[in-house]
Image (spheres, rainbow, N blue to C red):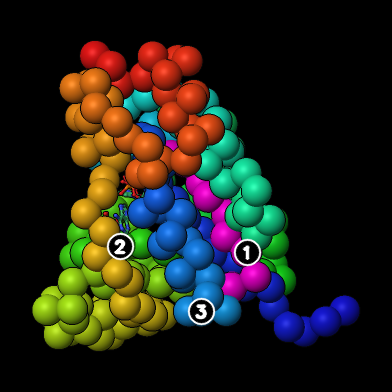
Amino acid sequence: MSDVKQKVGIMGGTFNPPHIGHLLLARWAMEECGLNKVLFIPTGTPYMKQRSEIADSFKRLEMVRLAIQGSPQFFVSDIEVAREGATYTCDTLEQLCQANPETEFYFIMGADCLFSIEDWHEPERIFAACKVIAAARNASSIEKLEEKRLELIRRYHAEIVLIKFPEMDISSTMIRRRVKEGKNIRYMVPDAVIEYIEQNRLYSG
Ligand code: NAP
């Protein structure tokens, strides 16, 4: 058996809907940190979000599946969508670690999440289960992020890698708004996802 552990990125998200920012972030983290693959995990019932404007979990899962088709190193998991009750990242990561003891997991996130991750459910369990890749989109915030990174390392023995990522002013909120206003979302979202949004009349209000 090889002692070289597989390095797997976890791209967790509401993906309401998935867009090119998510895809590029996953690809970027993979290259910067030498990951073997990235597993996209759409959330089930996000406990910190307003549920009313979130598309059905299985529709978001399907949109992610469509978004990553044709990318052989990207995979999607229904581990959270299939779970009953609230979605906690720590439960997901522990479940993945138990099932894959030979794998090193890297949770990929926008770097500003470093400032809120302590409000997530039992952050110490998250840091124990995985390393974190935090993507900084704004060069001017690097110093503050580095300070926060060191604080989390001290407090939780966390392993956190900060990577620089190009700023892309695109978000799921912007896309939902554009769909509602009847505006075009081509090039922001993969074509297959646009088709799915249209066929299922998502976000049109
Ligand atoms: P999301 O809005 O779909 O975003 C997914 C990720 O993509 C985030 O890290 C986000 O960073 C990043 N992203 C979005 N647009 C981007 C862009 N243009 N350029 C670069 N990065 C971009 O998902 P979310 O609702 O934030 O959830 C993220 C994960 O955190 C999920 O796995 C969720 O379960 C987890 N979470 C867990 C808890 C908990 O366990 N208690 C609480 C909160 C969140 P930004 O946020 O910086 O945009």
Q: Mark 3 points at which residue?
A: 33
123 or 78: nearer the eye? 78
- In the rendered view, does 130 fall on the left or right side of 39? left
The quarter of the picture where the C terminus appears is top left
Q: Looking at the picture, which amino acid does disc 2 mark?
A: Gly
> From what the image shows, is residue 136 above or below residue 14?
below
CB atoms of marks 3 and 1 within 8 Å: no
Q: Residue at x 83, y 82 (%)?
A: 2
Q: Mark 2 points at which residue?
A: 110
Q: Which residue is drawn at 36% across and 54% down?
A: 21
Q: Distance between the residues labelled 3 and 1?
A: 11 Å
Disc 2 is placed on an element classified as: strand
In the rendering, at what x and y percent does residue 5 appear?
Answer: 69, 78
Q: Looking at the picture, which amino acid does disc 3 mark?
A: Cys
Identify the image quadrant of residue 124: bottom left
Disc 3 is placed on an element classified as: helix
In the rendering, at what x and y percent does residue 8 appear?
Answer: 60, 66
CB atoms of marks 3 and 2 within 8 Å: no
Dot 3: few (<14), some (14–19), or many (≥20) neighbours within 10 Å? some
> From what the image shows, is residue 9 above or below residue 77?
below
Give, as a single range, the part of the protein colored magenta: 35-43
Q: Give whichever of discs 1 and 2 has the lower sequence position.
A: 1
Dot 1: few (<14), some (14–19), or many (≥20) neighbours within 10 Å? many
Q: Residue at x 26, y 72 (%)?
A: 136
In the rendering, at what x and y percent does residue 65 appear?
Answer: 58, 38
Q: Residue at x 41, y 62 (%)?
A: 25
Is the shortest distance between ligand 1 and the CB of mark 2 under 8 Å? yes
In the rendering, at what x and y percent does residue 52 appear?
Answer: 25, 21
